[in-house]
Amino acid sequence: MFFMYRALCRITLLQMVIGCFLLGASHTAKAQYTVHPLLQNGPLDRRMTIIVVSEGYKEEEIPIFLADAQRVTDKIFAASPFKEYKSYFNVLAVSVASKDSGIDWYGWGKVRDTHFNATYNDCVGIGVCIKPNADGSYTWSDFKWWMYEKMGYLDPFYMMLINDEMDAGTSDMTARGGSDFAPVVHELGHQFFLADEYIKPAHSPHEARNVTSKVEREQIKWKHWIEAGTPLPTPQTDQYKEKVGLFEGAIQEKGWYRPQLECKMRASEHDFCAVCKEAIISFIYQDERWSNRMTRIRKFLPAAEDLILKSTESLQLSLDAPLPEHGLLLEWFIDGVLVKTGAKELPVTGSGLGVGEHTVELRVKDGTPYVRDPVILPELTKTRTWKIHVPEPLSSPGDLNIANIVLGQNFPNPVQEITTFKFHLPKPSNVRLTVHDILGRKVAVVTEGAFKQGQHQVDWRPKSLGAGLYLYRMQVGSTTLTKQLVVQK
Ligand SMILES: [Zn+2]
């Protein structure tokens, strides 16, 4: 039955486009659909959504459909790279009862009354497809429109689960067949713009992320995966089983090539090849033409980029996003100095930053080993910048005149071994000069005591303090002045 699936499987771009855009659908569907959340990793509008739909299940078979939908979900997220990016997805199952069980076997005399009118072998080419209703409408399109009206735009990938023993699949529909919806992940691959890598003599081949007719190394779109010593075209032997190369036979026996000996786009029992994995991840990151996928999935808070933070206030900066299985590399910078790694949040205080203009940056990098394409690679690193203005605090009457207390910039700065602080007092005062980390925690006392009126200087060694940005703070009565210094090791 596996070979039958190979022969029947095909992609229809038109159906895929309808799936993405919900175009051309009239809305005649009645509210006979029941939505069951199967996998919930976040708000619906902040994740990609896979919608698994029943076809050819009778009313009493809906529990079977729900069990099937769960198995299909498990199957999808057992396959790399969906496995690694599972947290980026939600899955909804939608059940609707059909009068009959199974679907039409056109030309073989089996006719069933099913909800979406799915059939074998009666479409353009071969495979499984949808037949129109008598008025020319398609219940499948109407359903997609119904979903859109009910749930809003979900960036959906649709997968119709067909309750029938024939093996077949077509991009957004898969039958159970003899082997538990075997092609379902392969079919989902089509929705990520992957082409078939197996031989389909009746089809004309076309260039795709994973199929090419080019044989010159420099012209091969996946050349960044091919080692210098790998011959092109590549012999179809076990010696090159783990290598990316140029393997003849993709859609046509001759003249068209695939990246690896085995791949899920060639036979569904295999994993996706390196190039197909990369293409799927690229689709998540790069395809911003229609849906701005990553800008929906990933939020930086606060959303405003220009902020005012009083000396007495504090603020949490954060990344609100799912993490892939391998995590994300997160680096926080204040005024260009790395201050924290690995955390989704950075708390800052106005007094910690000190009076003035500051820049806080978060660099987010996905270090997945599955992407090497120099065009895609930069998409995996994103830097978000906040400008934070900390205004001069108002001095209260009765304080020392703030204008006459002067705290100079330490020298040298950055500090390696030793640095000098200078300050000026308008009258004899008690002074406390301290050093703080960027969260405002005191890490050193430079000096503390009574000083005469006039100019003073104090030397200080950072000793065991780690490299990074620090604040130094001079307290004179109720007046506090703050400046920054950098320790370099
Ligand atoms: Zn492949």
Image (cartoon, grey):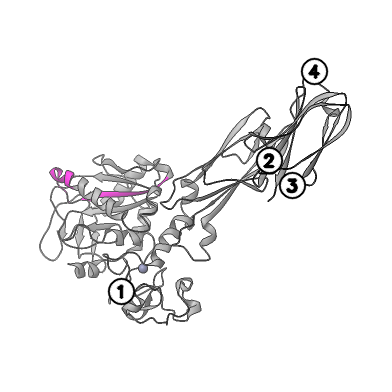
Is the residue at mark 3 in contact range of ligand 1, meaning its CB lies under 8 Å from it? no
The label number, if any, that marks residue 203 in the structure image: 1
Are discs 4 and 3 less than 8 Å apart at CB? Answer: no
Q: Nearer the viewer, mark 4 or mark 3?
A: 3
User: Disc 3 marks which amino acid?
Assistant: Val
- SS for callout 1: loop
Whole-percent x, y for residue 293 in the image: 46, 51
Q: Nearer the viewer, mark 2 or mark 4?
A: 2
Whole-percent x, y for residue 468 in the image: 66, 46
Residue on which the image places disc 2: 470
Q: Measure the C-alpha gap from mark 4 to mark 1.
A: 86 Å
Query: Is residue 63 found inside the magenta-colored segment of the image?
Result: yes
The label number, if any, that marks residue 397 in the structure image: 4
Precedes in sequence: disc 4 or disc 3:
4
Precedes in sequence: disc 4 or disc 1:
1
User: Disc 4 marks which amino acid?
Assistant: Pro
Precedes in sequence: disc 1 or disc 3:
1
Precedes in sequence: disc 3 or disc 2:
3
Where are the magenta residues, as a range? 47-64
Q: Nearer the viewer, mark 4 or mark 1?
A: 4
Are discs 2 and 4 less than 8 Å apart at CB? Answer: no
Are discs 1 and 3 less than 8 Å apart at CB? Answer: no
- SS for callout 4: loop
Within 10 Å of the Cα at label 4, are there few (<14), some (14-19), or many (20+) other Cα atoms? Answer: few
Within 10 Å of the Cα at label 2, are there few (<14), some (14-19), or many (20+) other Cα atoms? Answer: many
Precedes in sequence: disc 2 or disc 4:
4
Q: Quadrant of ligand 1?
A: bottom left
Q: Is residue 479 above or below residue 381?
A: above
Q: Measure the C-alpha gap from mark 4 to mark 3.
A: 36 Å
Q: Is residue 384 left or right of residue 76?
A: right
Q: Nearer the viewer, residue 343 or 306?
A: 343
Within 10 Å of the Cα at label 3, are there few (<14), some (14-19), or many (20+) other Cα atoms? Answer: some
